[in-house]
Amino acid sequence: MTTTKRTGTLETRKGRRLLEPGKPHMVPIYPGRYLVYRRPKSGVAGSWQACFVHPDTRKQTRGWIGFADDIDKANRTNILSFRQARTGALAWFREQELRVCTLAPAMPRTKNPLTVACGIEAYFKDAERRGVKGIPQDRYRANAWILPKFGHLQISMLTREGIEKWLDEMAGSPRKTCARIGHRPRQSPPPNTDEQKRARKESANRVLAVLRAALTYCVDRKLAESPDRPWQLVKRFRGTTKARIRFLSVEEQVRLVEACQDDFAQLVRGALLTGCRYGEMTRLQCKDYDPLSGSVFVAESKSGKPRHVYLTEEGRELFDGLTTGSDPEDFIFTNSSERRRGGCQEPTQWRNKEQCLKIRAACKKAGIEPATFHELRHTYASMLVNRGCVLSVVAELLGHSSIKMVEKHYGHLSRNTVRDELLRAMPRLGILKHGKPSKRKAG
C-alpha cells in the first residue's frame, strides 16, 4: 500500500486526479485508523473505505464508506466529499472500537488490555444511555485532541508526565476551525495575546475533563487496571474562566432586528423576548405556546429540565401572530429561504448552525460589533438584572438549576441594582446637624 504524505491530495478532485489509479491511497485519521481512497483504472469515480487496525492483533478490518465525488456532486448519502467520508469513517471506527470494548472485559488483561480509544467509546455509549447532554461536543474534542495522541495506547501505559506535556502542547497550539464542505480548514495562528492564551487554556481544560471522565469510568467499571490513576494527578489551568461582558443595548437590538430578513428576524425577536437557546427556539411548536397564561413551554433544554418562560406584552404579540390559525404540531419558527429550498417556498425547521452566518451578516449590516446568536440570550438576562429582577427568577427563566451561572455572568450587573435600591429605600437620618463633619485640630 502507498500512503500519501499530505492529506491535501485527497481533499479535492484535482488532487485525486494526480494519484495513481488502481492503488489504494491511505491517510491517517489517528493512529490505527485510516481513510482509504481507490480509483479504478477504467476512469470511473473512486471509492472511500475505512481501515481499522486492531490494537492487539494488528489485524486490518475495512469497511465501505461510499463513492467519491470525482464526477458527480456529493449528496451526503452514497457520493461523499473528503470531509463527508472522514465523518463517515469516524462513525464506522466507533462501531469497531465498541466491539473491541465489549470483548475486552471478558478476556485476560494481559492478552487484551483496553486502549484509550476503546475506553472513550465505552464511556460515550454509557453517557448516551443515561441521557447526558453535550456528547456530540465531547466526541469532537476526543476526535480532535485525545485520540490522535493517546487513542492507540493502553490505559495502563498513561503517565502523569505524558498527560501534562500533552496538555501544555494543546494549550499552546492554534485553535482548530471547521471548514465548509469542499474547502480546506483555515489555519489559525498560535495564541499570542493574553486573551487568546486564556481561551486556549480553557479549551484544554475542557478536553482534559473528557479524558478524566472516560478513564475514571473505565477503571471504576473494571474495564481497565490503573491503580495510580495518573490522570487525576494532572492539575487544570487556573484563572481561565471569564464572565461575558458582551450585551446588546436596546438601540443595538432594534438595529439588529431591522437588518435581519423576515424568517430570521422572527427568530431573533423570539430569542430577545424569551432568552431561549437557538436549539430550544427551533424546536418550539405551536402547542407549546399558551395564550391564556402568556407563556412558552420549553420541553427539551440543555439541562434536561423542562421550564415555562413567561412573556411580556410584546412577546405575546409576537407569538400570537406566529401561532394564530396554525396547526398545533407546526413549528413556530421556520425557514422558507428560497435559496435553501431550491425555489420551493415550503417552510422547514431551522437546522443546526444555520444561524451563524446570518447573525454575522446582520450585525455587519446593522453596523454593530459582531455578536453570536447565543449572546441574544445573555442580552435578555442582562436586561432583567439591570431592571432589578431577582437572580433566582432570572435563573428560573433561563433554565439553570441554580443561580451559580447567573452570578458568574451577570453578578457585576446586579451590584448597580443593589446600590440603586439602597439609595431608594434608605431614608435620610438627619444625624449630621452641623453640616459636613471635620476632624478637630489638635492644640
Image: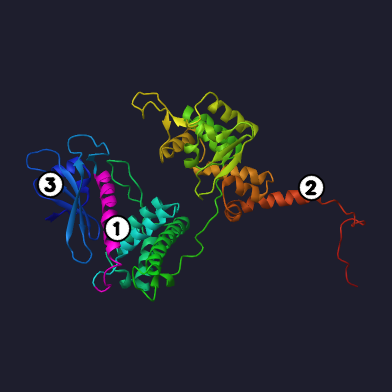
Q: Are marks 3 and 2 in contact (CB under 8 Å)?
A: no
Q: Is residue 238 left or right of residue 59?
A: right
Residue 306 appears in view: yes
Q: Which of marks 1 and 2 is in front?
A: 1
Q: Which of marks 3 and 1 is in front?
A: 1
Element under disc 1: helix
Q: Tell me which numbered mark, 3 or 1, is placed earlier along the sequence.
A: 3
Residue 225, numbered label: none
Q: What residue type is labelled 1?
A: Leu
Name the residue beneath numbered marker 2: 424
Residue drawn 46% across and 66% down? 236
Name the residue beneath numbered marker 3: 19
Calculate the distance from the C-alpha at mark 1 to the C-alpha at mark 2: 63 Å
Observer-nearest residue: 115 or 257?
115
Q: Tell me which numbered mark, 1 or 2, is placed earlier along the sequence.
A: 1
Q: Tell me which numbered mark, 3 or 2, is placed earlier along the sequence.
A: 3
Element under disc 3: loop
Observer-nearest residue: 224 or 134?
224
Vertically, is 60 above or below 321? Answer: below
Q: What residue type is labelled 2?
A: Arg
Name the residue beneath numbered marker 1: 98
Which corner quadrant of the image does residue 46 belong to? top left
Q: Is residue 366 left or right of residue 179?
A: right
Image quadrant in which the C terminus is located:
bottom right
Magenta residues, start to end: 82-110
Image x and y of residue 372, in percent: 48, 42
